[in-house]
Amino acid sequence: MLVKTYGSSVYGVDALTITIEVSVSAGNKYYMVGLPDNAVKESLQRVETAIHASGFKMPRQKIVVNLAPADIRKEGSAYDLPIAIGILAASHQIDADELGAYFIMGELSLDGCVKPIKGALPIAIQARKEGFKGFILPNDNAREAGIVNDIQVYGVNNLGDVIDFFDKKRTKPKPIEVNTREEFFKHINNYEQDFSDVKGQENIKRALEIAAAGGHNVILIGPPGAGKTMLAKRLPTILPPLNLQEALETTKIHSVAGKLSAANALMTERPFRSPHHTISDVALVGGGINPQPGEISLSHNGVLFLDELPEFKRSVLEVMRQPLEDRKVSISRAKFSVEYPASFMLVASMNPCPCGFYNHPEKECVCAPGVVQKYLSKISGPLLDRIDLHVEVTPVNFSELSSQRATEKSELIRERVINARKIQELRFSDKEELHSNAQMSPNMVRNICEINEQGQVLIKQAMEKLGLSARAYDRILKVARTIADLDGSEKIEISHLAEAINYRSLDRESWAG
Ligand SMILES: Nc1ncnc2c1ncn2[C@@H]1O[C@H](COP(=O)(O)OP(=O)(O)O)[C@@H](O)[C@H]1O
Ligand SMILES: [Mg+2]
Ligand SMILES: [Zn+2]
């Protein structure tokens, strides 16, 4: 008998429908066809053992499993469950009538239990799109799939649960219910950390507020213990809240990477990712034989924090340049290519020199001459070109640290950021894909960030006096525009420019000059 079950394969952040045809006929050999990778080929071994463990029989006949369409490579072990169900139905051990109405996905362990899958969310979206009635998948992924409306999602623990599901003598279990909107609004802005945890550092908070308001990448430079990591971690808390669309986009990427916890159906907080500096190129930007999203995509709609930037491998910083520009990453393979969104704010931190105390108000830098320059040159150039704000962080003193003075909560800062973003949305309303000042091209900067003659003079003087390089010019204008937006000012005033000029430390000739 020939039976069809349905599953899905994920490419990029979208899923395709895969038909699993199982035929059981006279003979005694097993075949698996339709471009399966090794993990899929090994499926029959797991399926056989799991079928036995569940009290059923593996037919001692000719079994052919065909995964269609045949020109698409099938990877991973999540086809175990639809294959097992197909074999049981094709050998008349269970009823096949309802199989056409469901997507079934899950890896089987030898005792018949199911293990979580990757991409449950895009698969559920695909099942709904194709008009399937339901989606049966491992319990651990059920809430993730459950946020898709108009499709019945059933979480199962083992093969036996699925066998029972298709047993007409039994009543069907209740599908999982996730109220997506409720889930979304219940948890939005539910951050554990807050800017009010950081004592003092008003000027750094101000710089981060500007960064958040204009979507500017930022680097924090300062000695160990100055609070760089603490400050960076709190950046998501002052960004505008995710809208439902963004929350779904971000959740989808984490679903594809298999990084959602069972309790967490929908990501309602902006991601904050902080990969270690030993990270590989592939882990950072994505890739691999079976492509997976990297840290830059897991940071989509949130913050990517590269702590101790000069410690990262040069190649890693190089591969990040293009995605930073494009806000997405394309991964090409011989037969296909996939794309992952990667629109994130980059926050980097670094010590000012290898010993950490260059320019420190109290401590002495012990680095040999030339070492500081070499250290900086590791990050200079193209990556640094994409960082609009350079912020020097000095540690707060003891009296500030122990002060009980109340400091501003993230929520208040966020309100100002939201207002500044509204102005930018209006400014760029006729330009698709452009939302914040940081995204302006050099040409647009000249058009949009108009300054008067007095401003021109100020910039020119500052550039000469501080020895700023030419590339600083556009950055200063962009950041000044954001500062003006925070101020609700249509014009860029001298005070806005003057503040923006402060954020170019690394362009200064005097730095390690
Ligand atoms: N301004 C501050 N307010 C409160 N705690 C601070 C402040 N600065 C530093 N700390 C404390 O010092 C610790 C070390 O700071 P950290 O952010 O790790 O520094 P860095 O990343 O610059 O080396 C923090 O975890 C925090 O406990
Ligand atoms: Mg740190
Ligand atoms: Zn030093």
Image (cartoon, rainbow, N blue to C red):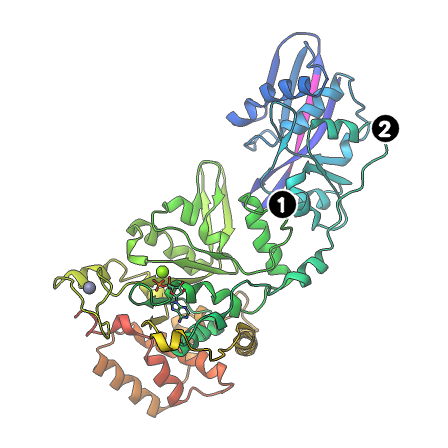
| Above or below for 154 versus 307 | above
Closer to the camera, 87 or 325? 87
| Above or below for 366 versus 62 | below
Let me know if residue 71 appears in the view: yes
Horizontal side, residue 144 vs residue 283: left or right: right
Provide the residue designation for mark 1.
262
Q: Which residues are magenta?
A: 17-23
| Above or below for 6 versus 277 | above
The tag on residue 168 is 2
Residue occupying image coordinates x 35% and y 74%: 396
**Spatial separation of the CA atoms under disc 1 and disc 2:** 29 Å
Question: Which amino acid lies under the numbered mark 2 shown in the image of this protein?
Answer: Lys
The tag on residue 302 is none
Residue furthest to the bottom in view is 454
Residue 262 percent across, percent down from the top left: 62, 45
Disc 2 residue: CB within 8 Å of ligand 1 = no
Residue 339 percent across, percent down from the top left: 50, 48
Residue occupying image coordinates x 13% and y 62%: 370
Question: Which amino acid lies under the numbered mark 1 shown in the image of this protein?
Answer: Ala
Residue 345 percent across, percent down from the top left: 45, 63
Horizontal side, residue 353 vs residue 418: left or right: left
Closer to the camera, 269 or 255? 269
Residue furthest to the top in view is 27
Q: Which badge, 1 or 2, comes first in the chain's sequence? A: 2
Magenta span contains residue 103: no
Residue 400 percent across, percent down from the top left: 38, 77
